Image: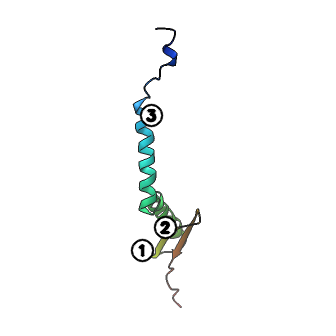
Amino acid sequence: MGILDFLKTRPKNTANIARERLRIIVAQERSQRGGPDYLPLLRSELLAVIKKYVNVDPEAVLINVERDSGQEVLELSVTLPEVKA
């Protein structure tokens, strides 16, 4: 090693570059799909909690995520069964 070797640019670690590119691609895919990845899991967990108290049809639970001005709004709609008189 010479005394001027520290001035040479070293090649960047290709694994770090690939990982950073993958992060960018995944972030773009998530933003383009419109819904976050956790939405199906959130729906099933909410349905399990609701079923503890009310016998409700799984299709009666609707979850929607809207983005507006940099904020996300989670909307939950549950259609409860009619009470028999």
Mark carried by residue 59: 1
N-terminal-most mark, 1 or 3: 3
Q: Nearer the viewer, mark 3 or mark 2?
A: 3
Q: CA distance from mark 1 to mark 3?
A: 44 Å
Q: Is residue 28 left or right of residue 71?
A: left
Count neighbours of disc 1 (C-alpha within 10 A) and say few if under 14, some if 14 to 19, many if 20 or more.
few
Say above or below: 36 vs 22.
Answer: below
Of the numbered discs in the image, which one, if any, rests on residue 16?
3
Please rate how many residues cluster around mark 3, counting C-alpha atoms within 10 Å: few if below 14, some from 14 to 19, many from 20. few
Mark 3 to mark 2: distance in Å?
A: 40 Å
Query: Mark 1, mark 3: which one is toward the viewer?
Result: 3
Amino acid type at mark 1: Glu
**What is the total number of numbered labels drawn onto the structure image?**
3
Q: Which numbered disc, 1 or 2, marks the residue that appears first in the sequence? A: 2
Q: Position of residue 52 (x, y in %)?
A: 53, 68
Residue drawn at the location 41% of the way across and 55% of the way down: 29
Most extreme residue toward the top, as rendered? 2
Residue type, numbered disc 3: Asn
Residue matched to label 2:
47
Which of disc 2 and disc 3 is earlier in sequence? 3
Residue 53: x %, y % from top left: 55, 71
User: What type is the residue that disc 2 sits on?
Assistant: Leu
Residue at left offset 54%, top offset 71%: 75
Residue 26: mark: none
From the viewer's side, name the closer residue of 75 and 5.
Answer: 5
